[in-house]
Image: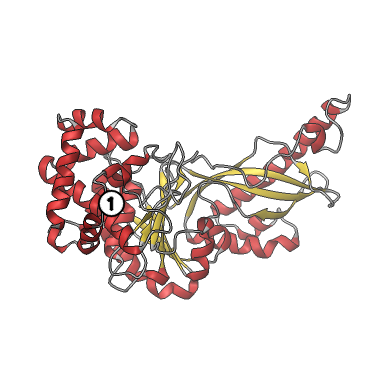
Amino acid sequence: MTDGDQQRGEQSATGVDRPRPRRRWPLWVALGLVLAVLTCGVPAVLVIGLVGDAVGRPAGTPSDDAATAAARQLGQRMTAQLDRQAAALLRGDRPGFLAVAEPAARAGLTHRYAVLRALRVTVWRPESDGLPTRVNGRPGEWRLPVTVEYCFVVPGCTPSTVVLGTRWREAGEQPRLVAVEESRSRPAGTRPWEVSDLAVAVGKRTVVATTPALRRKLPGLLAEAEAAARVADLYAVDASPPDRYLIFYAGRTEWQRWYGGGRPKWTAGYAVGVGGGHHDVVLNAGSLSPTGVDDLLRHELTHAASLPDGGYANKGAWWLVEGLAEYAGADGQPVSHYEGLAEVRKLVRGGWNGRLDDLAPADDAADDRVGGSYGVGYLAVRHLVDRYGEQRVLDFFKAVVHDDRSFDEASDQAFGEQWSTLHDDCVGYVRAVAA
């Protein structure tokens, strides 16, 4: 789900990262929506200084042009090596993939090759627009930031992107790869396939990956993910669901490391935008009961299906984003069976101000406050669906979340009603259910 992928206090003009609760688990669920520029965010390694700095000379000297030309030629030889490596990866040639690297780098690259092949990589396009820069204290060693476009399983997908730092040693006409540095680009951060060995299961609509230690969970997770995808597909607001949903099942260590970690303690899962319209989903193995995965997957995959590529700017739309995901997670069950009703009652009776646009819980909120917030969002969306039908609610969602229209304009467009009136109707319904 994308509770705003990085809504954990990083609300920005392009998105948010808030948590989303789930019943039956000791922890709640947080969703990560990429807000910021999903085209990779901030590079893990920046080109430092001016061209003169890059080659160890002051900018503005007569030798600048020659130095720049030499650095550019070196960068071109590096990218040519990366192109050779990419071609080897895609054709399944491990020796060719390792051939561009120094011996010390090959162990790490062997792991990366295995993981990318297990994920059925179909596109791997490294590019660099910058110049290589010298690595301080390492004569003959250079650093080059590289943007990689990649796809898994589907050859014709719109690629996701990641920025990687690469380090090289000069070696005649063919520089040698010394290391590939871990991505720290925002908002997504380090991808699981960069830092972990993975066991992978591939279905018709989903790809599920976890650590080798949790491999036994894969058959059940894949079956539940495939069922959840059929539900989530219905909530793609542009009628174009993701080509594949990519789901990572994280152990304790991986939960703290994948995509930058640092989620609120009550988080059980989140979705994070990785570019190309894709949102990866992460589940916290330590917080899920054996029977608590199905509705969580429906919730999170609905975020992946419904959210825009770059996140959403309107902080007051949190209830709508989470409410739609909760509605999908409930999968048609009667309101009386919704597991968060007790938390809703506590919130409503505990002095809630009655504003839907002020529901998002803080990262340090108590579990019942988080559960109540998600529950109110669910009930508000449920009321709108009961009154107008799913399609018109999706039209409303698209206008607010994708097109950044005001609630007033979106309500008039989708429902032909003033939002102030509908807002009060939704709040009245929530209070009636909580009575």
Q: Position of residue 407 (x, y in %)?
A: 26, 33
Q: Position of residue 430 (x, y in %)?
A: 17, 51
Vertical arrangement, residue 392 with respect to residue 336, above or below: above
Q: Residues within 10 Å of mark 1 (few under 14, many from 20)?
A: many
Say whether residue 116 is visible. no
Q: Position of residue 350 (x, y in %)?
A: 25, 57
Vertical arrangement, residue 57 with respect to residue 297, above or below: above
Disc 1 designates what residue?
325
Q: Quadrant of residue 97?
A: bottom right
Tell me what residue is drawn at x 47 percent, y 70 percent. 251
Judging from the image, the colouring scheme is: secondary structure
- In front here: 279 or 414? 414
- In front here: 45 or 214? 45
Tell me what residue is drawn at x 54 percent, y 51 percent. 189
Say whether residue 12 is visible. yes
Q: Quadrant of the C terminus?
A: bottom left
